[in-house]
Image (cartoon, rainbow, N blue to C red):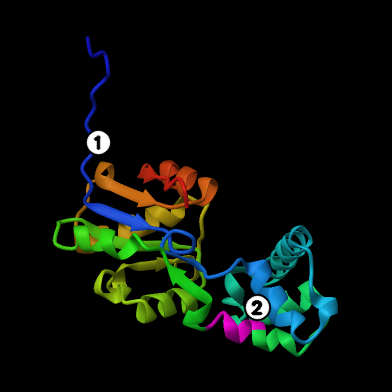
Amino acid sequence: MNTATKFKLPRCSLLTMDAYDTLYTPREPIAVAYNRIAGAISSDAVMETGEFKRRFKSAFQSVWQKYPNYGKAAHMPIDTFWRYVLVTLYGGNYEFIDDIIKHFETREAYKVFDDVQPFLNSIKNSKVQTCIASNAERRIVRLIIDEFGLGNFFKPQDIFLSYDLETYKPDSRFFKLILEHVQRRNPVSLDEAWHVGEDMENDVNCALDAVFCCIFPFGY
């Protein structure tokens, strides 16, 4: 006798998606790219992967604490924010810092996951409204959309970034604000709102706190 429990997934009429590491990712690990670019000028700048991750996290958090949300309140250009992070990381304003910043402003630094466009194509003609919901840096999200042909799937008004909302995951207000914006244009039932993201705290737990359904893409 088949004792498997049958259940029906809630309908999806709003699907929000994280950007970084869900739609796109760096072509090479961040530590590898930094070491390759910095090491071409100074071998002393090369770090072991574990050390790089620790120092990068510390540098980013230090600058973010002083200039939250990529320095928006201080009217800081985003590339200046990253310069502060890299100067803190390397302990000085070395010439290769410009090369690192410029590299990560180009499509050559990133790739879109192979299954992204086929999936978006498969739901393009459905009644599912698709949005981006991300803490990612706005210039890079715009670059990915423009350079990798994702503008066919996401309208400008359906791109929700923490930089613009001025609240960021894992604060559940992030998703609640998105729902408010969407509801003004097209009423959506809360139990039909889904989110896809790869980070357990920022995506899964945060979306569930906002009473979204959530999908965690194992294997990414």
Q: Position of residue 28 (x, y in %)?
A: 58, 69
Q: Residues within 10 Å of mark 2 (few under 14, many from 20)?
A: many
Give percent across and percent down for residue 216. 42, 45
Residue 9 numbered tag: 1
Q: Nearer the viewer, residue 170 or 32?
A: 32
Give the tally of numbered discs.
2
Task: In the rendered structure, find residue 82 and report the number of the disc placed on it.
Answer: 2
Name the element at disc 2: helix
Residue 98: x and y, percent?
67, 88
Residue drawn where x is 72% and y is 66% of the image:
56
Q: Which quarter of the rendered picture does the N terminus lie within?
A: top left
Q: Position of residue 43 (x, y in %)?
A: 82, 79
What segment is highlighted magenta in the picture?
A: 100-105
Mostly what secondary structure, the magenta segment?
helix
* Left or right of 116, for residue 64: right
Element assignment for label 1: loop
- The numbered mark, 1 or 2, whose residue comes first in the sequence reads 1
Pick the front one: 56 or 220 = 220
Q: Toward the viewer: 96 or 185?
A: 96
Is residue 77 visible in the rendered image? The answer is no
Kind of residue at badge 2: Trp
| Mark sitting on residue 49 | none
Q: From what the image shows, is residue 116 above or below residue 42?
A: above
Callout 1 crowding tier (Cα within 10 Å): few <14, some 14–19, many ≥20: few
Taking the view exactly as shown, the residue that stands out farthest to the top is 1
Residue at x-position 34% and y-position 62%: 116
Q: Identify the amino acid type marked 1.
A: Leu
The quadrant holding residue 42 is bottom right
